[in-house]
Amino acid sequence: MEFRKTIMNKINWLFLDFDGTLVNNLDLMYKIYINFLKRFGKEGNKDEFNKLNGPNLTEIVNFLKENYKLDKNTSELLKIYEHEVEKTYEDIIPTKKNTDLLQKLKENNIKLALVTSTNRSITEKFLNRNKWKEFFSVVVCGDDVKKSKPDPEIYNLCVNLAKVGKKDVLVIEDSENGIKSATNAGLKCISINEEIKLENIISTIAKNE
């Protein structure tokens, strides 16, 4: 597969996206988006939701407020959306398969960073609740940056915090916005999809160590 050529050399750091990559929760996030708009008598769609896979919650809410002329102020809308996301994350249980994959990377001395557009408070609660925090040396969240994916700021910040050269990093993403963010930061990026699975990428990395 083409992705194997990307990881022929030794990888010191793996930067992992969260929603849709490590956690298969995009259907739940789509439901939140649809129900949020329904509160105001508006109807969302899949194409718009896909474009919003990358921006942080504040950017999403600002976009929806402007695009649908929502009459509440931004802070009220953000509280509503954040509350629904936090409730949803409480019900998400990571698969044993992905926990085992993270453990495998740790055993192969691959340093891991989590790079997510989700707010830190929600992300940290999830990591602590599911005992995933120990796997990540760096965690960068949507509210740590002024501009989120597809802007490269979030990945540039992660590189600085990890104190690593960009050539030693591989990014795994699932969305167009995430891929643009990583590549615009000058990082190698592999997109998971129906043909390229997370476990295949990680198995290849482990074999190359």
Image (tube, rainbow, N blue to C red):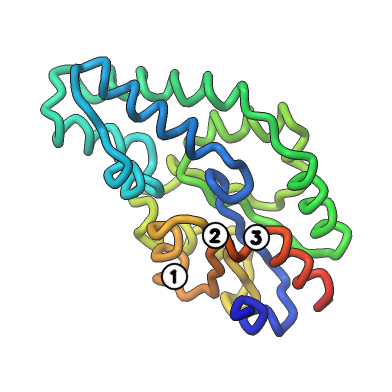
Q: Which residue is mark 3?
A: 197
Q: Crowding near pointer 1: few (<14 within 10 Å), some, many (20+)? A: some
Identify the residue shown where x is 65% and y is 60%: 197
Identify the residue shown where x is 54% and y is 29%: 121
Question: As displayed, is residue 50 above or below residue 183?
Answer: above
Which disc, if any, is residue 193? 2
Amino acid type, mark 1 = Ala
Q: Nearer the viewer, residue 29 or 63?
A: 29
Q: Nearer the viewer, residue 52 or 97?
A: 97
Which disc, if any, is residue 185? 1
Where is residue 189? Give x, y as percent. Answer: 53, 70
Question: As displayed, is residue 81 above or below residue 177?
Answer: above
Which residue is farthest front?
A: 195
Q: Are marks 2 and 1 in contact (CB under 8 Å)?
A: no
Q: Nearer the viewer, mark 3 or mark 1?
A: 3
Give the left or right position of residue 125, taking residue 108 as reference. Answer: left
Where is residue 62? Give x, y as percent. Answer: 23, 35
- Spatial CA distance of label 2 from label 3 is 6 Å
Identify the residue shown where x is 54% and y is 75%: 188
Q: Which corner quadrant holds the C terminus?
A: bottom right
Q: Nearer the viewer, residue 25 or 187?
A: 25
Identify the residue shown where x is 53% and y is 59%: 173
